[in-house]
Image (cartoon, grey):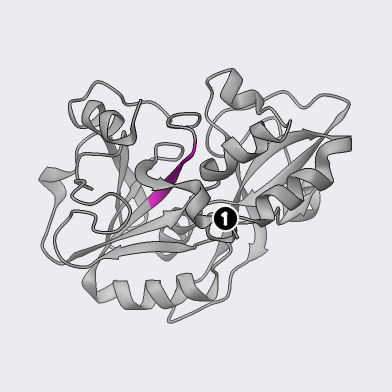
Amino acid sequence: MSPQALRELIAQGKFDRPTSGECPGYVQANMVALPREYAKSFEKFARANAKAIPVLEVIDEGFTSKIMAKGANILTDIPRYNILKNGVVVEEVTDITPYYQEDLVFFLIGCSFSFENALIQNGMPLRYVDEKKNVSMYRTNIKLNEVDGFSGEMVVSMRPIKKEKVADACVVTSHFPRMHGSPIHVGYPEMIGVKDIANPDYGDSVLIKEDEIPLFWPCGVTPQNVITKMKLPFAITHAPGHMFVSDVKDSEYYE
């Protein structure tokens, strides 16, 4: 299925599940929408924490993409969205048209789903993709650089990788710096504040076998964690795991 065809299904309400494994070879993106009064500070904050929040496109007029998928409607083309008020998720919806206001600025942010295909092609199957689950995501104690009052801790995604393939996974993903790049941590989840790896804060739990090591990548759910901590009056994000699937090939972001 092409990204455009998938987005059409999403807009029609015929696809509302996590996008991991969909449209292999195409870039997927996280989404954050903030009122204009917070947008410039958030953009500076993202630039200061580019490994966790790599900005791919800023849409500061209207609600259609001009870079990642020309003409795509950000209000309808993501499977699920979170509506946050005063830092609390008050609703999960499949269409944010009723919540749109002209002062909203949309940010599309690099996502680790974009390097899934490269890992698989290099002999590293991903269990959550095979099992059609959402990736496991965790809040951590990894501090972000504070900018203009934006602060907080990083969220990470976890993938079990066979021990003999850990170095390969680090190298393969390092070639995608705009998609979080190489892991932020390898093994020892307790060192980054993950107390119970069997119970992720977002997404689904997956088995970690004895011959595997958990690898942790920065995650685009990080802004939601920050917005929650800051108790911003209003924001919209993608629901974790439910990404904007773009028309851009992941090979265009290979470095």
Closer-to-camera residue (38/88): 38
Where residue 127 sits in the image (x, y, percent)? 66, 24
Q: Is residue 228 above or below residue 61?
A: above
Position of residue 129 in the picture relative to residue 188 (left or right):
left
Q: Is residue 29 magenta?
A: yes
Closer-to-camera residue (85/19): 19
Please tell me whether mark 1 sits on a helix, a strand or a loop: loop
Closer-to-camera residue (74/192): 74
Q: Main secondary structure of the magenta part?
A: strand
Where residue 113 sits in the image (x, y, percent)? 52, 41
Closer-to-camera residue (151/104): 104
Q: Is residue 246 above or below residue 154?
A: above
Badge 1, how many Cα within 10 Å: few under 14, some, many 20+? some
Position of residue 199 in the picture relative to residue 232 (left or right):
right
- Segment colored magenta: 25-30
Q: Amino acid at mark 1?
A: Tyr
Q: Is residue 65 magenta?
A: no
Q: Which residue is mark 1?
A: 254
Q: Is residue 187 visible?
A: no
Q: Is residue 184 above or below residue 248?
A: below
Count the labels in the image.
1
Residue reaching furthest to the top: 131
Q: Residue visible at 61% across and 36% down?
A: 200
Q: Is residue 61 visible?
A: yes
Residue 107 falls in image quadrant: bottom left
Q: Residue visible at 49% across and 47% down?
A: 250
Position of residue 110 in the picture relative to residue 208 (left or right):
left
Q: Residue visible at 18% across and 50% down?
A: 71
User: Split into 4 quadrants, where in the image is the C terminus?
Assistant: bottom right
Where residue 146 sits in the image (x, y, percent)? 53, 77
